[in-house]
Image (tube, rainbow, N blue to C red):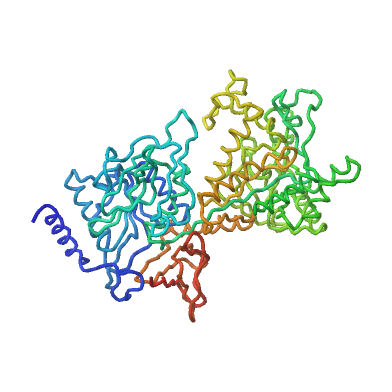
């Protein structure tokens, strides 16, 4: 009979005992009475490596339910036919729609127990048509590739110009990508990615390849290996969840794994808040290495710098830039600070006049009237500042009336000038009022009431301090990503100088903060003030922002009006983010540019959905060409399905969701008088 025949016989016997041998997965459109039920959950076999962890992070961020099976857990269940499948109401059920494993030998075939688990898993995949991702392996015939010494490559991939193949873009899962996928190379001193590029053998279809010699030969880094009645996605390069190459490929990996039918949805979001509009911002002193007006710059000397404030010409440029780039900025404004500036400068203000003339070109967000600190009363007689206390040691707080006036007066000024502003959105100055560690470990107790007084539902927080959305009374926070384009600089040279001060060792003339802060890294040498911003800071900040965009992260980024003034140093960063994105992604996956309330709603829905999953209150499965999703009443379910999918209504049906990246997806709830969401998949 031979080895293959013996193995096939053992698998058949095991399946016969489980009662599922005769079950074959029909394509969507097959008769429902013969089709098995396939639950929309992914099985993840975890070896603790970075590659599996990266895929888990993608599943979690999208909202795909998964079950984690840790190989090092002595109490984990044995993977056998009963673990993988059973029967529900007389119908065979596959408990998992896809499987993620560390490599092609997940349980270790060198032991009898491991070989048995491998056989059970592979038989399950054959029987139900379940796909498997080998998270990271090497190039060899066992995964459908030649050894690398036969026309391939093994080694460091930093800076490699990989590309999606024709198959990967058409029949494969990466049709949402247009341009080359460049592997990160952030430091010449560190090898950031290693891999094996192998030539495909029979049964292997390459989806992503890279050059392997000077003659133009190419070899695979990601592909599909069809063999033995199974399909594996074979990944032959190392990665982690934060690397750019993984971030842009992760969507396609999940779509391939799930046949494009899964819970969860993903978009590429990018929003930019411009804080302090109408107000001036203090300027960095390159001689004293501090910002006059800040308490840590209080040596008693006169202010040595002039404030930075946009001009009418800067406002005109902002309008033109938006029109050219096809991107809308959020103007986060302090009307009272602008009025104070005008009073101090002869009673006229060309900037305000220009922004008001172009008010319909922007989105506007309340930033309070005069940027008052809304937390505790600050005692600035010490560095760092402390919360002031009364005679009996009670913390003194900005009052509810003062907070409310800051919000109300700013809103009323805008509506009086014809600016369309949403009362529910707020960004407090410095995110004040919220807890500020270490000095103020609690929110101002007067903040929640003032927010309610003014109808605020979404108040911004700093993602570097509080990355998770949370409640503040009846409002919810919207975490924002700070960008390393500083509020107190108007020129590239000032930006490079302050950057050097923060990120350079003391021996190199810096503050040395980077040497003592474990979360920081020192520059190898100071940046050239004349070129450092363009050559180092711009590409780094654009890369970081693009990684957020590609990660289904809706959180907005924030900078300040000073960055649109003088040398207008923000635009090179934004231009690079948008250009790099549009060169890489197809038109089917455009950047989504949401406003604050929509970001808050997205984060809120995700939190509710994740809790429903964690509580085990979601049931979702496919039978033939029908997908059924049941969630608790009032819970929006995120669902992704192929083009052509329709949602069943009480009477008739409608096109499901909205188109994005070659699929259709939406947050959805059952139709009137229905207890579940029912989708009909296309028959093709």
Q: Residue furthest bottom?
A: 651
**The furthest residue to the top:** 507
**How far across and how far down the image is residue 313, in percent?**
79, 45
Number of numbered markers: 0
- Image quarter of residue 50: top left
Foreground: 223 or 2?
A: 223
- Residue 333 in the image, given as x and y percentages of width and height: 75, 49
Which residue appears farthest toward the left when viewing the image? 1
Name which residue lies at 76% across and 47% down: 315
Is residue 579 placed above or below 627 in the rendered structure? above
- Write the residue at 36% across / 54% down: 67
Residue nearest the viewer, comparing 33 with 297? 33
Give x and y (percent) for residue 591.
57, 54
Task: Locate the C terminus by quadrant.
Answer: bottom left
Indicate whether 684 appears above or below 139: below
Q: Quadrant of the N terminus?
A: bottom left
């Amino acid at each position: 009979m031979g080895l293959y025949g013996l193995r096939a016989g053992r698998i058949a016997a095991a399946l016969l005992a489980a009662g599922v041998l005769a079950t074959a997965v029909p394509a969507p459109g097959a008769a429902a009475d013969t089709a098995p039920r396939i639950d929309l959950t992914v099985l993840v076999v975890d070896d603790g490596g970075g590659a599996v962890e990266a895929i888990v992070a993608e599943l979690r961020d999208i909202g795909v339910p998964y079950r984690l099976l840790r190989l090092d857990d002595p109490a984990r269940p044995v993977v056998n036919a009963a673990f993988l499948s059973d029967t529900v109401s007389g119908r065979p059920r596959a408990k998992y729609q896809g499987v993620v494993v560390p490599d092609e030998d997940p349980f270790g075939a060198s032991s009898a127990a491991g070989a048995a688990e491998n056989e059970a898993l592979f038989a399950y995949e054959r029987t139900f048509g379940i796909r498997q991702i080998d998270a990271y392996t090497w190039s060899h015939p066992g995964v459908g590739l030649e050894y690398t010494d036969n026309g391939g490559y093994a080694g460091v991939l930093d800076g490699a110009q990989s590309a999606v193949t024709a198959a990967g873009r058409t029949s494969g899962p990466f049709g949402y990508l247009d341009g080359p996928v460049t592997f990160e190379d952030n430091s010449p001193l560190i090898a950031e990615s290693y891999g094996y590029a192998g030539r495909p053998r029979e049964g292997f279809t390459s989806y992503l390849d890279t050059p392997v010699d000077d003659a133009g030969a190419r070899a695979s880094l990601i592909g599909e290996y069809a063999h033995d009645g199974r399909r594996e996605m074979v990944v032959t390069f190392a990665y982690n969840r934060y690397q750019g190459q993984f971030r842009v490929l992760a969507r396609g990996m999940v779509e391939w794994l799930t046949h494009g039918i899964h819970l969860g949805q993903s978009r590429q979001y990018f929003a930019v808040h411009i804080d302090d509009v109408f107000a001036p911002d203090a300027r960095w002193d390159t001689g004293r290495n501090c910002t006059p007006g800040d308490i840590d710059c209080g040596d008693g000397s006169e202010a040595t710098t002039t404030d930075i404030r946009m001009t009418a010409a800067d406002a005109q440029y902002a309008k033109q830039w938006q029109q050219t780039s096809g991107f809308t900025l959020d103007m986060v404004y302090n009307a009272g600070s602008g009025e104070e500036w005008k009073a101090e400068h002869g009673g006229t203000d060309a900037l305000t006049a220009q922004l008001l003339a172009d008010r319909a070109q922007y989105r506007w967000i309340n930033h309070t009237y005069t940027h008052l600190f809304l937390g505790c009363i600050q005692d600035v007689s010490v560095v760092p500042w402390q919360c002031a206390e009364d005679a009996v040691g009670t913390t003194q707080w900005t009052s509810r009336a003062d907070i409310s006036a800051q919000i109300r007066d700013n809103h009323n000024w805008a509506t009086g000038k014809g600016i369309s502003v949403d009362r529910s959105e707020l960004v407090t100055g410095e995110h004040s009022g919220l807890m500020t560690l270490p000095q103020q470990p609690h929110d101002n107790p007067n903040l929640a009431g003032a927010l309610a007084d003014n109808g605020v539902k979404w108040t911004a927080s700093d993602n570097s301090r509080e990355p998770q959305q949370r409640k503040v009374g009846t409002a919810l926070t919207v975490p924002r990503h700070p960008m390393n384009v500083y509020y107190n600089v108007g020129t590239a040279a000032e930006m490079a100088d302050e950057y050097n001060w923060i990120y350079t060792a003391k021996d190199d003339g810096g503050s040395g903060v980077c040497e003592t802060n474990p979360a920081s890294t020192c520059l190898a040498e100071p940046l050239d003030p004349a070129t450092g911003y363009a050559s180092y800071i711009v590409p780094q900040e654009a890369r970081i922002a693009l990684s957020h965009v590609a990660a289904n992260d809706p959180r907005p980024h924030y900078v300040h009006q000073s960055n649109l003034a003088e040398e207008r140093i923000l635009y090179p960063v934004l231009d690079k983010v948008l250009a790099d994105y549009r060169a890489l992604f197809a038109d089917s996956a455009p950047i989504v540019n949401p406003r604050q309330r929509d970001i808050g709603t997205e984060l809120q829905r995700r939190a509710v959905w994740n809790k429903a999953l964690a509580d085990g209150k979601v049931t979702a499965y496919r039978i033939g060409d029908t997908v059924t999703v049941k969630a608790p009443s009032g819970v929006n379910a995120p669902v992704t399905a192929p083009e052509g999918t329709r949602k069943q209504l009480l009477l008739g049906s409608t096109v499901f969701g909205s188109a994005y990246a070659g699929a259709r997806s939406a947050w959805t709830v059952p139709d009137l008088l229905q207890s579940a969401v029912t989708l009909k998949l296309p028959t093709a």
